[in-house]
Image (cartoon, rainbow, N blue to C red):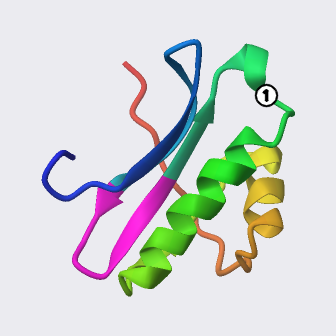
Amino acid sequence: FLERGIGYCILHESKIVSAATSMARSRRAIDVEIATVAGHRKQGLATVVGAQLAACCLERNIEPRWLAANAASERLARELGYVRGESYETLSIIS
């Protein structure tokens, strides 16, 4: 991540409370990951870090890809201007 990753965060009392990062990256695209600490949700922090990450990608000619895992993630993606693409099935390994 230190060599090729991209990320932005919001600090509160010197602790990260919201972050948008490249979960995976290729030369032309990243998979966006956003997380916000439970006590800081519903304040628009994910929107701020997500918008900053998307802007950085567009400046660098990198496609930010969003894989919405739930309804809240999908709402945030739409709020940030993402357009729904094709659906596909994913599998998980549970041990």
The amino acid beneath tag 1 is: Arg
Does residue 62 belong to the magenta stretch?
A: no
Q: Is residue 62 left or right of residue 16?
A: left
Across and down, in percent, residue 92 comes to 45, 39
Q: Is residue 61 left or right of residue 55?
A: left
Q: Which residue was labeled with disc 1?
A: 41
CA neighbours of label 1 inside 10 A, class few (<14), some (14 to 19), many (20+):
few
> Which residue is painted at 42% across and 25% down in the image?
94
> Which residue is painted at 57% across and 61% down in the image?
52
SS at circle 1: loop
Q: In which quarter of the image is the C terminus?
A: top left
Q: Which residues fall within the magenta stretch?
A: 24-32
Residue 65 in sight in this render: no
Residue 20 in the image: above or below residue 26: above
> Which residue is painted at 55% across and 72% down in the image?
55
Q: Quadrant of residue 50?
A: bottom right
Across and down, in percent, residue 2 comes to 17, 45
Q: Quadrant of residue 10?
A: top right
What is the residue that sits farthest to the left in this orientation? 3
Q: In this view, does 7 lie to the left or right of 54?
A: left
What is the residue that sits farthest to the front in this orientation? 13
Q: Quadrant of residue 36?
A: top right
Across and down, in percent, residue 66 comes to 57, 64
Residue 72 in sight in this render: yes
Helix, strand or loop for the magenta stretch, by majority: strand
Q: In this view, does 67 lie to the left or right of 73?
A: left
How many marks do you count on the picture? 1
Residue 23 in the image: above or below residue 16: below
> Which residue is painted at 38% across and 87% down in the image?
61
